[in-house]
C-alpha cells in the first residue's frame, strides 16, 4: 500500500498568513493526488485534484503543486473560513489512501 | 436537498451485521463510480470500497474484504454497504461519496452515518 505522510500534523497561523502543507507518498504517484478540507462534524470537501487543478468553486487563494512523491497545498492568505483539517489522498493505486491530516489552528 | 444521504448506522455488537444505505438525488449517480469512506472517532479518513457504474467491478481495502459488500441500485439511485462480522475497529462515521473514475478522488460527499461496534 502507498503510505501518505502529511506535515505538519498541526499548524498555528493567523488570518492573512501564507500557509503551506506538505504531503509525501511512499512511492511515486505521478500527479494522482487530491486535497480535501474538513471542518469539525462535517464531511470532507474536495479542494484540488491532479495535484494542482482547483475544483470548481474553490477560492483561488488555494493552490497545489508537486509530482512524484512530494506535494504541497498552499493557502496564500489564510481566511477565517480556512481553519480546518486538510487531507491529501492518492489515487494512483488501490487501495486509495489518505494522509493523516493537518489541522490548521488559529494562532 | 442534500445530494447524498446515508442511513442505517447504529450500535451493534461485535460479530454482528449492519446494512448502510446511501440515497442520491439531484446528481448524476448512474454515470459514476461510488465509494464508501470511513472515519474513526478523532482519526483520519480511510477509503473502504468502490463500485463501478454498472456494479460489475468492486474494490475493497484489505481490512474489510470478505466481510463487507458494496452494491448499488441504479434504478433507485442508491448505494449500499453490507457489513458482516463487525469488529470494534469498524467503529466510525461512514461517508458515501461519488468518485470521478475508476481510481479517483471523491467530489460529492454525504454527511455520514455513525456505526458503533461495542458490547
Image (cartoon, coloured by chain):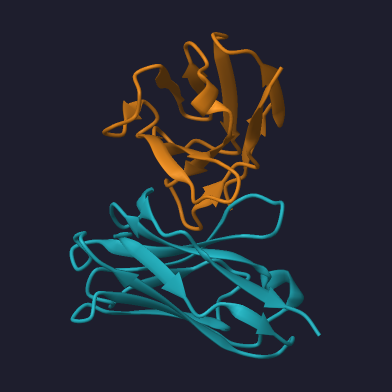
Question: Is residue A64 left or right of A2 when viewed as pictured?
Answer: left
Residue occupying the far front of the picture: B1
Q: The cyan chain is which one?
A: B
Residue B24: x and y in percent read 29, 68
Residue B99, above or below B75: above
Point out residue B18 in the picture as x, y percentages from the top left corner. 56, 86
* Image height of A29 relative to B105, above or below: above
Residue situated furthest right in the rendering: B119
The answer to which image quadrant residue A85 occupies is top right
The quarter of the rendered structure image containing the N terminus of chain B is bottom left
Front-most of A70 and B11? B11
Q: Residue B30: image x %, image y %?
A: 19, 68
The quadrant in which residue A14 appears is: top right
One can see residue A32 in this view: no
Whether residue B75 can be seen here: yes
Which sits in the foreground, B35 or B92?
A: B92
Image height check: is B73 above or below B23?
A: below
Which residue is found at the position 62% from the left and 74% from the top? B115
Number of callouts = 0
Question: Which quarter of the rendering shows the C terminus of chain B?
Answer: bottom right
Going by the image, does B16 lie left or right of B9?
Answer: right
Instruction: List the single residue furthest toward the bottom.
Output: B16
Residue B31 quadrant: bottom left
Q: Colour of chain A?
A: orange
Residue A3 relative to residue A88: left or right: right
Which residue is painted at 58% across and 30% down in the image? A23
Residue at image point 54% right, 8% down? A16
Determine whether A85 is above or below B102 in the image: above
**Residue A66 location, x and y as percent?**
45, 22
Amino acid at each position: 500500500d502507498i503510505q501518505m505522510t502529511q506535515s505538519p500534523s498541526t499548524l498555528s497561523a493567523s488570518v492573512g498568513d501564507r500557509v503551506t502543507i506538505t504531503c509525501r507518498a511512499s512511492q511515486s504517484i505521478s500527479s494522482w493526488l487530491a486535497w480535501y478540507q474538513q471542518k469539525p462534524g462535517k464531511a470532507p470537501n474536495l479542494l484540488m485534484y491532479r495535484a494542482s487543478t482547483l475544483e470548481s468553486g474553490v477560492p483561488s487563494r488555494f493552490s497545489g503543486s508537486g509530482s512524484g512523491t512530494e506535494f504541497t497545498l498552499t493557502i496564500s492568505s489564510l481566511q477565517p473560513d480556512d481553519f480546518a483539517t486538510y487531507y491529501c489522498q492518492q489515487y494512483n493505486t488501490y487501495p486509495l489512501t489518505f494522509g493523516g491530516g493537518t489541522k490548521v489552528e488559529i494562532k | 436537498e442534500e445530494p447524498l444521504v446515508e442511513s442505517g448506522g447504529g450500535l451493534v455488537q461485535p460479530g454482528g451485521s449492519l446494512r448502510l444505505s446511501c440515497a442520491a438525488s439531484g446528481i448524476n449517480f448512474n454515470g459514476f463510480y461510488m465509494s464508501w469512506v470511513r472515519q474513526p472517532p478523532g482519526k483520519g479518513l480511510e477509503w473502504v470500497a468502490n463500485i463501478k457504474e454498472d456494479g460489475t467491478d468492486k474494490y475493497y481495502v484489505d481490512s474489510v474484504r470478505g466481510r463487507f459488500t458494496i452494491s448499488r441500485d441504479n434504478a433507485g439511485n442508491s448505494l449500499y454497504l453490507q457489513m458482516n462480522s463487525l469488529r470494534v475497529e469498524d467503529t466510525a462515521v461512514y461517508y458515501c461519496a461519488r468518485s470521478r473514475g475508476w481510481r479517483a478522488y471523491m467530489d460529492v460527499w454525504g454527511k455520514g452515518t455513525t456505526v458503533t461496534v461495542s458490547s
